[in-house]
């Protein structure tokens, strides 16, 4: 119970607090299927960080996604940001 309370408290201090469960599930699904030009998927840690931070700008993704310049094109970076915006219905301000 203490762990659950700690997790809920933490999540309530992050941008994800205003996102609904179906939106989170949709975002996780989309991120899990996302592949860059290299064919490499996002790691579980990268998906969790995207969920925690809900990036809205490229610079934020550069802090989250390892070797992003090697793994994603500019168009794919924009597509990833669009997935976050679409799946969370713009409920974050980044």
Image (tube, helix red, strand yellow):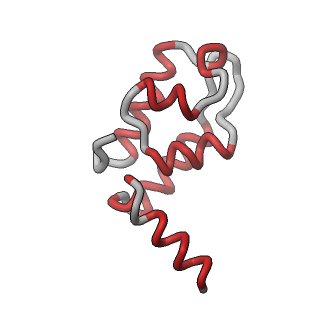
Q: Which residue is drawn at 69% across and 39% down?
A: 43
In the image, residue 10 sits, relative to residue 94, either above or below, namely below
Q: Quadrant of residue 73?
A: top right
47 sits to left or right of 91: right
Q: In which quarter of the image is residue 68?
A: top right
19 sits to left or right of 61: left
The one of 69 and 63 positioned closer to us in this rendering: 63
- Counting the numbered discs, the total is 0
In the image, residue 35 sits, relative to residue 15, either above or below, namely above
In the image, residue 74 sits, relative to residue 2, either above or below, namely above
The one of 72 and 14 positioned closer to us in this rendering: 14
Question: Whole-percent x and y of residue 7?
Answer: 54, 70
Question: Whole-percent x and y of residue 90?
Answer: 29, 44
Q: Residue at x 54, y 74 (%)?
A: 6
The one of 40 and 58 positioned closer to us in this rendering: 58
The residue sitting at the bottom extreme is 1
Q: In which quarter of the image is residue 32?
A: top right
Question: Whole-percent x and y of residue 94?
Answer: 34, 40
| Quarter in which the N terminus is drawn | bottom right
């Amino acid at each position: 119970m203490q762990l659950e309370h700690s997790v809920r408290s933490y999540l309530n201090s992050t941008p994800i607090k205003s996102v609904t469960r179906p939106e989170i599930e949709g975002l996780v699904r989309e991120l899990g299927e996302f592949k860059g030009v290299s064919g490499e998927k996002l790691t579980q840690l990268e998906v969790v960080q995207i969920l925690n931070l809900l990036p809205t700008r490229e610079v934020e993704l550069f802090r989250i996604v390892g070797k992003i310049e090697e793994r994603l094109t500019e168009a794919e970076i924009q597509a990833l940001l669009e997935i976050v915006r679409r799946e969370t219905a713009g409920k974050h301000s980044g």
